Image (cartoon, rainbow, N blue to C red):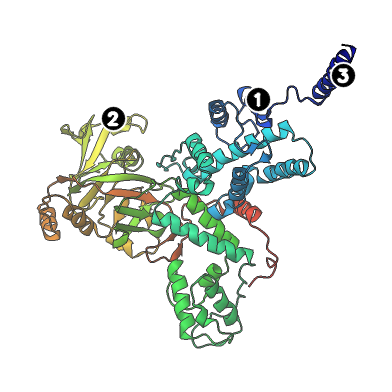
């Protein structure tokens, strides 16, 4: 019996020692690391206040709400780490954020340096067999989630607030369900593929992105060498600068590698390459490298990258798809084109708004054509241009412009019966309407599409302006050189069409107003692209006529984002 009691005492003693060790080492209440991190994340998100939990100044006002909703749905479970520390999704996202420059975005916007430093600290602890820090893991999760939301918002719907910088910007920012996108990316473990699903899908965006990456490769290889000033370079001459010119054109695909000669002779192949460069930069195509062409050739590659990034960002505000058949008007190119099944079937020269009366940027659908249109004179023009004249001469309007009180559809009133001296710009109760005719500012054809700016595409009696290279002359509407051609195209695709160009011209000669509603409504997009890819795959640059590219500020972002390769100090 005594031996049995001794044995029991030994067992109890050993159990006591074991229990003491468990208590002192914390094994009794040990919990999975992810649960502890979840507790901290929930505390941080529930108690979060202000614009951003992590003070990312670039974030929009919904950041806190998004974080709270995302983590509440998953009970605080960390998205980017497990019990062993950061997971593969964290590495995937960090890799995408570091390459943001390749999408025309800036890694600095997404806290890349801070995320990298935090991951490095956590990995050091793990490699040294140190317990992982719960606070650091919670920080990392919130940082990565916030970075994902911000990057995805910029990647899918634009980084800059173009509505603030361009008062005539009618496009609405494209909205993406950020929580749904993140959840899908995490569940599928396909971070990049999931993000690509929310990016624009149309030709101009995808091709410009490709060319942006080509130019970034050029920049990381050292850029291109500046061509020194001197006499104009042209076919048939020899000059040591010809070598540099040829390399410059080869670097951006203007000349083929077979033309990579080392001599100083300016041959026919080089002249052809110069003409192509001039065409794609909107310059006179004479094949001569004069002062203007030289300036464009010497624009640094970093500036070109900046221009592409700005234009990519504007394209992100457009619809995901522009339409199998659509009309595209590019203001800096002064051009309207009809695209059908990925082919441009018609080019028409356009006149756009003056620099102080910019054409609005928007997407809509053409709903009607109006032959022999009335011109319902905008109030701004009526009070700024017509009212001063009417104060001096009540007969100024003549017979072609009628005055209506209260509504365009009511009977006109005689201008001479109005005491114009008492009428002011603030108190202008009249509407002015010009009747159809050869001198009507809308010409003989008007194209109607719903838009809050109340602008149109229309004909014009001032035909000589289409010979100008730079055509910013209107009050905001878009005037086109061949309105009958556009009308015939739009009417041709209508059901039961009976209209030809000849029929349209015959109806115009009658001089009577005729609205023609369209059943098949074609999308129209008015854009502002100083850089774009045409349907032949050529990269085009044009002057920033409205001065909205903001190149100096954006260039700083590009310079800070570009990687510095070993050859960066040795331009090609």
Q: Distance between the residues labelled 1 and 2?
A: 66 Å
> Which residue in the structure is indicated by mark 1?
39
Confirm whether residue 237 shows in the render: yes
> x, y percentage for residue 159?
53, 44
The residue sitting at the front extreme is 1
Q: What element carries label 2?
A: loop
Q: Which of marks 3 and 2 is in front?
A: 3
Q: Nearer the viewer, residue 201 or 238?
A: 201
Please state the horizontal and vertical placement of residue 264, each as a whole percent of the image: 58, 86
In the image, residue 565 sits, relative to residue 27, either above or below, namely: below
Write down the quadrant of residue 151 in the picture.
top right
Seen from the viewer's position, the closer of residues 461 and 72 is 72
Nearer the observer: mark 3 or 1; the answer is 3
From the viewer's perspective, is residue 11 above or below residue 433?
above
Neighbor class of circle 3 (other Cα within 10 Å; few <14, some 14-19, many 20+) is: few
Disc 3 is placed on an element classified as: helix
Residue drawn at x 46%, y 55% as measured from the top left: 545
What residue appears at the point 43 percent right and 61 percent down from the top-left corner? Answer: 533
Residue 493: x %, y % from top left: 18, 53
Q: Quadrant of the N terminus?
A: top right
In this rendered view, identify the residue nearer to me: 515 or 174. 174
Q: Which residue is drawn at 70% across and 65% down?
A: 566
Q: Which mark is residue 429?
A: 2
- Residue annotated with mark 3: 10
Q: In this view, does 456 lie to the left or right of 220?
A: left
Outermost residue, top direction? 1
């Amino acid at each position: 019996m005594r031996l049995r009691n001794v044995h029991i005492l030994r067992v109890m003693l050993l159990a006591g020692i074991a229990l003491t060790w468990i208590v002192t080492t914390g094994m009794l209440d040990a919990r999975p690391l992810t649960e502890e991190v979840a507790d901290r994340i929930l505390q941080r998100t529930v108690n979060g206040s202000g614009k951003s939990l992590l003070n990312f100044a670039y974030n929009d006002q919904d950041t806190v709400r998004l974080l709270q909703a995302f983590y509440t749905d998953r009970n605080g479970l960390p998205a980017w780490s497990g019990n062993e520390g950061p997971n593969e999704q964290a590495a995937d996202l960090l890799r995408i954020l570091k390459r943001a420059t390749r999408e025309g975005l800036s890694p600095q916007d997404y806290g890349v340096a801070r995320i990298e430093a935090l991951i490095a600290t956590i990995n050091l602890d793990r490699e040294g067999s140190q317990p992982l820090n719960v606070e650091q893991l919670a920080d990392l999760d919130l940082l990565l989630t916030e970075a994902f939301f911000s990057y995805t918002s910029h990647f899918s719907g634009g980084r800059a607030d173009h509505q603030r910088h361009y008062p005539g910007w009618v496009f609405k920012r494209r909205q993406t369900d950020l929580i749904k996108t993140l959840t899908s990316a995490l569940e599928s473990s396909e971070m990049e593929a999931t993000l690509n699903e929310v990016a624009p899908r149309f030709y101009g965006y995808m091709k410009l992105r490709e060319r942006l990456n080509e130019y970034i490769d050029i920049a990381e290889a050292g850029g291109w060498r500046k061509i020194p000033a001197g006499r104009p370079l042209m076919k048939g001459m020899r000059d040591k600068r010809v070598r540099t010119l040829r390399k410059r054109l080869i670097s951006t695909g203007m000349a083929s590698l077979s033309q990579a000669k080392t001599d100083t002779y300016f041959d026919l192949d080089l002249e052809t390459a110069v003409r192509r460069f001039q065409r794609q930069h909107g310059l006179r195509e004479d094949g001569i490298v004069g002062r203007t062409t030289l300036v464009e050739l010497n624009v640094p590659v970093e500036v070109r990258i900046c221009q592409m990034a700005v234009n990519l960002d504007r394209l992100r505000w457009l619809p995901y798809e522009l339409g199998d058949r659509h009309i595209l008007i590019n203001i800096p190119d002064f051009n309207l084109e009809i695209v059908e099944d990925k082919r441009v079937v018609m080019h028409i020269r356009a006149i756009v708004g003056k620099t102080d009366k910019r054409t609005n940027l928007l997407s809509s659908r053409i709903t009607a054509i109006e032959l022999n249109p009335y011109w319902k004179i905008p109030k701004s023009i009526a009070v700024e241009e017509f009212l001063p004249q009417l104060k001096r001469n009540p007969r100024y309007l003549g017979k072609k412009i009628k005055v209506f009180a209260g509504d365009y559809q009511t009977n006109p009133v005689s201008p001479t019966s109005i005491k114009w001296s008492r009428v002011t710009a603030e108190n202008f109760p009249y509407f002015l309407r010009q009747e159809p005719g050869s001198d009507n500012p809308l010409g003989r054809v008007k194209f109607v599409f719903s838009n809050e700016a109340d602008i149109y595409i229309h004909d014009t009696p001032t035909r000589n302006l289409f010979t100008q290279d730079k055509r910013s002359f209107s009050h905001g509407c878009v005037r086109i050189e061949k309105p009958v051609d556009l009308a015939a195209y739009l009417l041709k695709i209508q059901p039961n069409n009976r209209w030809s160009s000849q029929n349209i011209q015959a109806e115009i000669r009658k001089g009577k107003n005729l609205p023609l509603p369209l059943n098949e409504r074609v999308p129209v997009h008015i854009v502002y692209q100083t850089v774009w890819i045409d349907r032949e795959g050529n990269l085009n640059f044009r002057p920033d006529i409205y001065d909205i590219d903001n190149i100096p500020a954006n260039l700083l972002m590009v310079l800070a984002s570009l990687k510095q390769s070993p050859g960066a100090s040795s331009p090609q």
